[in-house]
Image: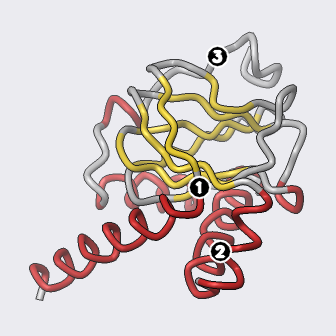
Amino acid sequence: MQLKKRKYLENKWKYDYQTLSVYGEIGRTGESQLIYSFEKPADAVFFVTSGFVRLFNKETCRTKIVGAGEFFGDRSVFFTKHIYVEAVTPVEYVRIDEKAYSRLMRHEPKLAVELITNISKNQLYLTEKQSLLSETKEMFSQMKKGYSKVHRLKKNDHQLCCHCS
C-alpha cells in the first residue's frame, strides 16, 4: 500500500511540474537568497521542483519549510507585509504570475484550486497563534516528508524578528 501511495505521489508531482512549467517561468535561487520579502512582494505562486525554502513571518516569528512538490506564494489575497521567503538550499521552482494563473484557472482548474489550497494552509500556519499542538503537527509533517532536521531547526534571524530578541 505504501509503495502505491509513493508511486501515485511521484506521478502526481511529475504531472504538476510538467503542467505548471507550461504556464510559468523556471527559476533558480542560491542558498540563503531571498525569493521575496515584505519589502519586495512577488505577487506570484511558486512550485518547488528541488531544494527547500523557509517561509518566515516576522510578526509571529513562525517558520515553515517547503520542499519539492509543494507550493508557496504571495498572491494578493494572501499577501502580508510580514512574510518573507528564503532559500535554505539551492532551489529550483516554477513561478506563476497573475496572467499565467488566470490561464491555469481556465485550463487546469483542479490544479489551480490545489495550488491556492496549499498557499492558504501555509498562510494560516504562519499567521495563527503558536501552540504546542500546531508546532508538533508541523514537525511531524516535515519528518514524514523526509525533511532534514537541519532544515527544520535553524535559529531565527534576530535582526528580522523583533519578538525573538
Q: Amino acid at mark 1?
A: Gly
Pointer 2 residue: 104
The crowding category of the residue bearing disc 1, from other C-alpha atoms within 10 Å (few below 14, some 14 to 19, many at least 20), is: many
* Type of amino acid at the residue the image marks with label 3: Asp
- For the C terminus, give its image quadrant: top right
The outermost residue toward the top is 159
Rendered location of residue 92, percent (x, y):
43, 39
Residue 86 location (% of width, % of height): 58, 29
Q: Nearer the viewer, residue 130 or 25?
A: 25
- The secondary structure type at the circle numbered 2 is helix
Q: Label 2 is placed on what type of residue?
A: Leu
Task: Name the residue: 46% across, 49% down.
Answer: 48
* Badge 2: residue crowd in 10 Å (few <14, some 14–19, many ≥20): many
SS state under label 1: loop
Could you tell me how far apart the alpha carbons at marks 1 and 3 are, in whole angstroms?
Answer: 31 Å
Residue at the image point whose x is 55% and y is 36% from the top: 54
Nearer-N-terminus badge (1/3): 1
- 28 lies above or below 102: above
Residue identified by numbered label 1: 24
Q: Which residue is mark 3?
A: 157
